[in-house]
C-alpha cells in the first residue's frame, strides 16, 4: 500500500512540476507563470482581486478565439465551492503578452452582478468584452465557434 501511495504521490508531483514549468492555461497558471506573470500583474493593477484567483479556482478548459487578426486564449475560473458568487475570465495573447479580464461578483441577497473590467483596450472593447462575458457564463464553452470575430 505504501509503495502504491508513493508512486501516486510521485506522479502527482511530476504532473504539478510539468504544469508549473509549462504555464498551463489556467487562471492561476497565468497569474504565476514565468511567461505571463507580468501581464497578469499589469491587468490586475489597481484592482483588488481575491487570493483564490492566483491560488487556483475551479477552472474550465481554455478556448482559442479570434478577434480581428489576432488569436487569443479565453480562460475562466470561479471561486471553489461558490461559483455562483465569484467568477473571473481572462483573454491571453501569448504572442503579444497581453491580458484582459473581467471579475464578477454576485450579491446573494439582491442577485445583482457587479463586473470589474480589467485592461480592456479600445481594440477589445466590444468583441473582447463579449468573449470575456461568454467565458464567465459558459456560453463560450457551449458554443465555441460562435465567438470568433474577424
Image: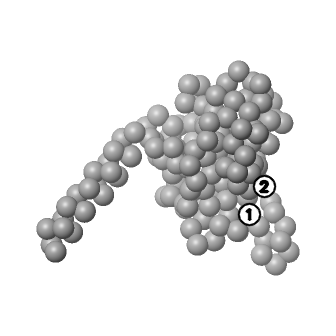
How many numbered circles are shown? 2
| Position of residue 147 in the picture relative to residue 91 (left or right) | right
Instruction: From the viewer's side, name the closer residue of 134 and 36.
Output: 134
In the displayed structure image, the side of residue 120 where residue 17 appears, left or right: left
Of 131 and 31, the residue lying toward us? 131
Q: Which of the 4 quarters of the picture holds residue 114?
A: bottom right
Say which residue appears at 77% left-offset and 30% top-offset.
Answer: 149
Residue 57 visible (yes or no): yes
**In x, y percent, where is residue 139?**
74, 51
Name which of mark 2 and mark 1 comes first in the sequence.
1
Residue 58 drawn above or below residue 30: below
Q: The residue tagged with tag 2: helix, strand or loop?
A: strand
Q: Residues within 10 Å of mark 1 (few under 14, many from 20)?
A: some
Q: Residue at x 33, y 45 (%)?
A: 18
The residue wearing badge 2 is: 115
Q: Quadrant of the N terminus?
A: bottom left
Relative to 125, residue 69 above or below: above
Mark seen at residue 105: 1
Amino acid at each position: 500500500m505504501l509503495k502504491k501511495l508513493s508512486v501516486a504521490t510521485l506522479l502527482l508531483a511530476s504532473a504539478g512540476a510539468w504544469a508549473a514549468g509549462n504555464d498551463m492555461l489556467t487562471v492561476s497558471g497565468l497569474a504565476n507563470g514565468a511567461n505571463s506573470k507580468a501581464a497578469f500583474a499589469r491587468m490586475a493593477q489597481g484592482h483588488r482581486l481575491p487570493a483564490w484567483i492566483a491560488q487556483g479556482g475551479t477552472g474550465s478548459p481554455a478556448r482559442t478565439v479570434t478577434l480581428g487578426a489576432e488569436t487569443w486564449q479565453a480562460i475562466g475560473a470561479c471561486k471553489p465551492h461558490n461559483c455562483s458568487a465569484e467568477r473571473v475570465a481572462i483573454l491571453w495573447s501569448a504572442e503579444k503578452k497581453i491580458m484582459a479580464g473581467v471579475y464578477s461578483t454576485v450579491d446573494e441577497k439582491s442577485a445583482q452582478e457587479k463586473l470589474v473590467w480589467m485592461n480592456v483596450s479600445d481594440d477589445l472593447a466590444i468583441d473582447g468584452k463579449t468573449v470575456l462575458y461568454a467565458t464567465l457564463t459558459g456560453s463560450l464553452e457551449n458554443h465555441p465557434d460562435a465567438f470568433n470575430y474577424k
